[in-house]
Image (cartoon, rainbow, N blue to C red):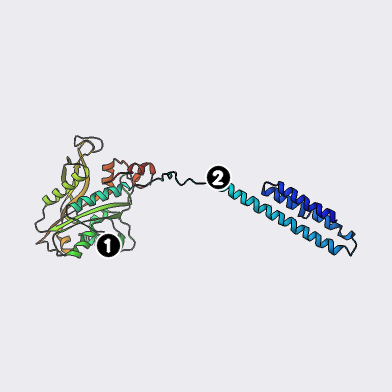
Amino acid sequence: MEERLAALLATARQRLAAARSEDEVRQVQVDLLGRKGELTAILRGMGALAESERPRLGKLANETREAVEALVAGKQAELARGALDRRLVEEAIDVTLPGKPLPSGSLHPITLVLEELKDVFLGMGYDIAEGPEVETDWYNFEALNIPKDHPAREMQDTFFITDEILLRTHTSPMQIRYMQRVAPEVPLRAVFPGHVYRRDEDATHSPMFTQLEILAVDRNISMGDLKGTLLTFARQLFGPDRQIRLRPSYFPFTEPSAEVDVSCIFCNGAGCRACKGTGWLEILGAGMVHPRVLATGGYDPEKYSGFAAGLGLERITMLKYGFSDMRDLFTNDLRVLSQFKGVRA
């Protein structure tokens, strides 16, 4: 038995020295020390030994097991160090090489147009202010000369939260909020960008969209001031050759009111498919601030007058960049958005 234990240890040294993988090491461990391994077979012969020999040979068997286990652990550590060394060589990084280019984002086309509009109106001396998207019925309708039984409420399919709380349907409530904040100071010039909400969705409408409200209040403001401001805006946004026209319309919070068209940016007014042969494209609604709205905002309509205009940024963006479907602005399609890399308003 003593010779068999010595032979087992020698076999362990020989096989482990030749092992080149973790699997080979585990196989040596199983063959020599496993439940059906050589050491187990040797220990089964302990019963045939003289009783005086059993303690010595039992101790030798345990020492042999410990020696083989130490050899196995040493070989496993050696293989692990070798694997790490190989990995460090294989995965070595040359820090002197240039880095891989990362895909860069771009500003959304609506953001580009909004930033351009802000620059236009800041250049004309306007302030920029924002207000709450969750509004009260009073600010959204009643303060703008739209009482609860007014038929104009049917023009805007509203998201109501309660009977008196709603998602604003336009940025016009900021007319009242801003006038109340600064009244009776003049001149007042401000624009109010922000999201608005209506129950509407198709190729040219979205349930959430972006508006920009324009408001000016002072002594002796006229429709001529309104037209001059809008002409400046149109030419800076669409090009110096643009013309505008005002068509009579109706809005409860302005009187008189007008729809504003710009000469077609695609055919320069000659008539094309985009403008349906008219030479004009509708861009916004505007008018002189209604006396009741001025009074609600804290300005005496006998002393002061003002104009207001509201435009949809999605509409302007579609015209400026040639979109045919508003939904393309909201699908986050990288084929669309990647075209605006490097574009700055």
216, 279: nearer the viewer: 216
User: Looking at numbered disc 1 in the image, what kind of residue is underneath it?
Assistant: Asp
Counting from the top left corner in percent of width and height, residue 99 is at: 43, 45
- Above or below: residue 280 compared with residue 67: above
Do the CB atoms of the residues marked 2 and 1 lie less than 8 Å apart?
Answer: no
Counting from the top left corner in percent of width and height, residue 213 is at: 22, 54
Counting from the top left corner in percent of width and height, residue 308 is at: 18, 54
- Above or below: residue 297 compared with residue 111: below
Secondary structure under tag 1 reads helix
Counting from the top left corner in percent of width and height, residue 133 is at: 30, 59
Q: Residues within 10 Å of mark 2 (few under 14, many from 20)?
A: few
Q: Quadrant of the N terminus?
A: bottom right
Q: Residues within 10 Å of mark 1 (few under 14, many from 20)?
A: many
Q: Quadrant of residue 67?
A: bottom right
Q: How many marks?
A: 2
Q: Is residue 49 left or right of residue 83?
A: right
Q: Is residue 320 visible?
A: yes
Q: Please tell me the numbered disc located at residue 17.
A: none
Q: Is residue 185 left or right of residue 200?
A: left
Q: Quadrant of residue 54?
A: bottom right
296, 332: nearer the viewer: 332
Q: Please tell me the numbered disc located at residue 90.
A: 2
Q: Mark 2 and mark 1: span between their CA atoms?
A: 68 Å
User: Looking at numbered disc 2 in the image, what kind of residue is underneath it?
Assistant: Glu
267, 103: nearer the viewer: 103
Q: Is residue 288 left or right of residue 48?
A: left
Query: In front of the other: label 2 or label 1?
Result: 2
Secondary structure under tag 2 reads helix
335, 257: nearer the viewer: 335
Q: Quadrant of residue 57?
A: bottom right
Q: Please tell me the numbered disc located at residue 137.
A: 1
Q: Is residue 37 visible?
A: no
